[in-house]
Amino acid sequence: MTERRQGQERRFTDRAAGRAEERQLRSIIEQLPDGIVIVGSSGLIRFANPAAEQLFGRSARDLVGTEFGFAIANGSPAEIDVLRPGGETVKAELRVVEIVWEGEPSKVISIRDVTDRRRAEEHARQAERERAARAEAEAANRAKSEFLATMSHELRTPLNAVLGYAQLLEMGVGGTLRPEQQQQVDRILTSGRHLLGLVNEVLDLAKVDAGRLSVQIAPTSADETVDAAATLLRPTAEAVGVALTVTRMDQSSVYYDGDEDRVRQILVNLLSNAVKFTEGGGSVELKYGEANRPDPEARLGSRDGCIFFRVTDTGTGIPSDQLSRIFEPFVQVDSGHTRPNDGSGLGLAISRRLARLMRGDITVHSTVGEGSTFTLWLPSSGETKATATVTESRGLSRSVSQTHGLGDVGQIILRELDHLMDGFVARVRSECGIPGANTLRFSQIADHVASYLADIAGVLISLEEVEKQPSSLLADAADIHRLVAARHGTQRARLGWSEAALRCEYRILGEEIGAVVRPRGASIPPAAFAEASAMIRRLLDQAEQYSVRAFARAKTEEKST
């Protein structure tokens, strides 16, 4: 009897302990953040915690006694889709543990909402796919640019040969041409130069896209750049009856930080487009000067202190929905087969890329039927004092006593040109540290120098003849000096010279001119002799800058090819 009572007491104690454990387990389960349901051996839900109610979107009262509805297996986690009453689907991760619940074998099922995690993982995979696609597209674009750059070089070589032989025919090297033959050669040259221009545009665009186009940033006079660009376009404008005017908005010269050759290329393109899309009787105006701040849409490295070059025309204008596309490659506003103007559609794309390479930008405003305004923005160099140049000499006010005798200095240079060149070449061989200088031919060292000196002499003679009157010869001289100096620097780069050697020969050239002119100019008025000497020095300094800039560009292009 006693043993039976003791057994009953033990069973009662065990049941009480079990109920206490279940209450404790229930309390823990109810506080867990994961959804927990307990499913009996029959597959019916016996218990659901608050997190499960939230996950399923149903109350525990509705859940208890219903089929769980998902395959239950011990082991690795499984993923299920939970459909809520409103039609929303939730991704959930399911785990199963076997227990005894209220005396019956059951399964504790943990259900964790992994929707956000799966969404984040999918976003990461999508981002990776996009990154891979972007990298592939960039690689394809680089390959395209490399191909265009290579092919452009390959095209230019035979094209330059065609133009060269056509020029020889035009000069009569192969015999005097009949009028109809001369006309045909002119057409070859015109078409060839147009084609060469298109090839050069493709090459520039390819180099920009491939990151192989460099610019030489230096303080440069806006007056010189504008004058050179306007001089090139004025004949074209006059031929179609368009008035081209240039206006400087500041009292003194302004200087920008940029590559003069590239800035001139941009301005020529903007002016060319303005003239091209303006009918006869219309006008194109180029204004330039300093601005405190650029247009809001301009993307400049610095928004304080900039130089603007504004080209305004009275042409056809551009529809507003096309303004954002005109700077894209190969895009033209009128793209039909009957469009009145030819071109590749690369000019504006290249111009904006070049401007941004120089930490500047190009903006546009236009109204259909009224015209367009394109503005090139460049950083200001901060210089205010103008450097004397050939172009400035057109406006110099000289007295007769100052100009009388300049022509004599020019005549001395012309008479002694052979002697001057002999001394120049001999000193360059011995003083400039050029590897293999003694093996170079006289013509390789003399290069363009004789032509350049002859043109300097011509400028001095012209200045005396015109005195205070402006002369187109002086405008032409500015272009000739710039071209010859740039070609000289490029040629020195091809020969493998150093920049120090290039600067050395300009020093020698100045000294040789002085050594030739000084003893032979005793009869020249001192004021005129001093004026001529100062002008020659300024011209040589300017030519040296042009040559060094072209030299650096040629070296950079050589490394990139």
Image (cartoon, rainbow, N blue to C red):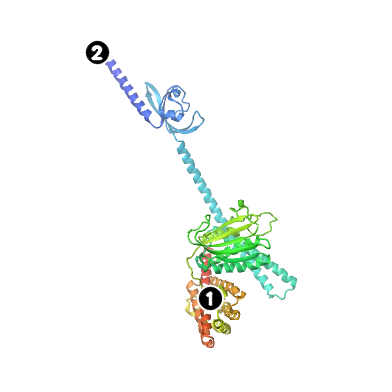
Numbered badge on residue 503: none
Question: Mark 2 or mark 1, which has the lower sequence index?
Answer: 2
195 with respect to 303 (left or right): right
Residue at the far bottom in the pictured view:
523
Q: Residues within 10 Å of mark 2 (few under 14, many from 20)?
A: few
Tell me if label 2 and label 1 are in contact, CB under 8 Å.
Answer: no
Give the quadrant of residue 342.
bottom right
Measured as percent of width and height from the top left, residue 219 is found at 49, 67
Residue labelled with disc 2: 2
Residue nearest the observer in this picture, 179 or 234:
234
> What amino acid is found at the position of numbered circle 2 in the picture?
Thr
Q: Position of residue 131 (x, y in %)?
A: 50, 48
User: In the rendered view of the protein, which quadrant contains the N terminus?
Assistant: top left
Q: Nearer the viewer, residue 48 or 68?
A: 48
The secondary element bearing badge 1 is classed as helix
Residue 154: in sight, yes or no? Answer: no
* Residue 191 percent location from the top left of the image: 68, 65
Q: Nearer the viewer, mark 2 or mark 1?
A: 1
| Side of 195 relative to 80 (left or right) | right
- The residue at the point 47 percent across, 43 percent down is 124
Above/below status of 121 relative to 103: below
Query: Is residue 508 depicted above or below 155 in this figure?
Result: below
Inspect the image, locate mark 1, and give the three-letter code of the amino acid beneath it: Leu
Residue 465 vertical position relative to residue 198 in the rendered view, above or below: below
Q: Nearer the viewer, residue 150 or 523?
A: 523
Whether residue 384 appears in this view of the structure is: yes
Give the number of the disc on residue 539.
1
In the picture, the quarter occupied by the C terminus is bottom right
